[in-house]
Amino acid sequence: MRRSAKATSIGNAAFDALKNGDGEVHSVFKRTFNVLFGGELVGVARSDVTRSPINLVTDIPPNESMSSLGIDKGMQVKVDDRLLIDEVLEISLKDATIWRPRNCVDGHPNFEHVKKNLKILEKFVANNGRREGLGQLLSHIDEIAAGKRPSASDFSEVAEATLPHLASLFEAVRSGGVDEIKKISRNLVGLGPGLSPSGDDALVGLMVALWWSANSLGGDIERVKKINEAIVSCADKTTLLSQQLLRHAARGETNEVVEILLDGIFVGEPEDVRVSAQRVLKIGETSGADMTVGILLGLRAGFTLL
């Protein structure tokens, strides 16, 4: 007998992917399982997972593991007004809302206010960020932005491998050299383990921050488009999931938790920044910290393009 659940929200890209017809379970994790529909992944998630363009969030409670529901890689998924995952799970789509990401802040930000909140964010994550993944770089943003190469004997392997390329990319973005950006990005895309490698997550944060800076503060959005297009030009080097996230980020689109953080930076109060930053840092094993590194560098670079 199938377990029954309801979808509460469907990201706009996930909604479009469902139109491709029946799919197949691609991968299964504790909080989500991914389904491949016509070449596009949709993340079917528990209720505690943030909304994003490619997620379908259900009412399955946080104390249940998706991997314990009997769902296995390769299971067939049928689509009508429900998702039928083999004989294991039925998810009603009838009452789900369509969630669409934003690509600029709500309100009218003041540049000095934004810079002040950015400093608050940098201080907070330097003291509270995870040490895994690129988390160790959160306390070295000033040095990276100044063109220095911080050295630490306890850097993780992925942080040490990513650092020189990330620093070079920051300089290339500020100078606007598209060919150089493409060259450097090839060294970052796919760098690190997992379905969303650390290098990809940092690039996602950087591109989203660049887009939001230009689109919210009246910057050169056409220049940002060219920069982001150069970064994603080699997206096919990484996992299918990361490819999708990178392409959304190139248009300034990300998940809801990062959106809330960006809102806090641009128009919020210091406590808004701290609370939303803490939520971002909890994303995935290292993805939140990795994206935050990219956001910090992307905002700094974005300010130079205004």
Image (cartoon, grey):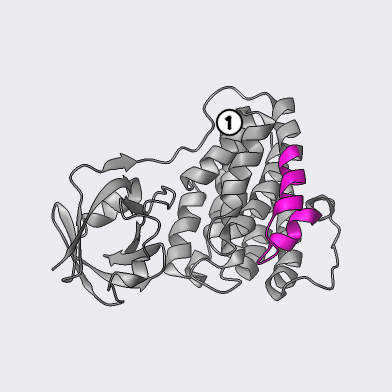
Horizontal and vertical percent position of residue 76: 20, 72
Instruction: Tell me the quarter of the image containing the N terminus.
Output: bottom left
- 296 and 182: which is toward the camera: 296
Q: How many numbered callouts?
A: 1
Is 83 above or below relative to 155? above
The picture places residue 100, in percent across and down from the top left corner, at 38, 40
Per the picture, the main secondary structure of the magenta-coloured stretch is helix
Under mark 1, the amino acid is Ser
Q: Which residue is mark 1?
A: 216
Q: Residue at x 64, y 48 (%)?
A: 295
**Residue lying at 71% horizontally and 68% vertically, measured from the top left:** 159
Q: Which residues are magenta?
A: 120-140
Q: Residue at x 59, y 55 (%)?
A: 288
Question: Is residue 217 visible to the viewer in this orientation of the structure?
Answer: no
Query: In the displayed structure, would residue 239 be above or below residue 171?
Result: below
Secondary-structure class at tag 1: helix
Does 133 appear in magenta?
yes
Q: Position of residue 151 (x, y in %)?
A: 86, 67
**Which picture quadrant has residue 32?**
bottom left
Is residue 194 shown to the viewer in this render? yes
User: Is 304 situated left or right of 247 in this image?
Assistant: right
- Towards the viewer: 293 or 72: 72
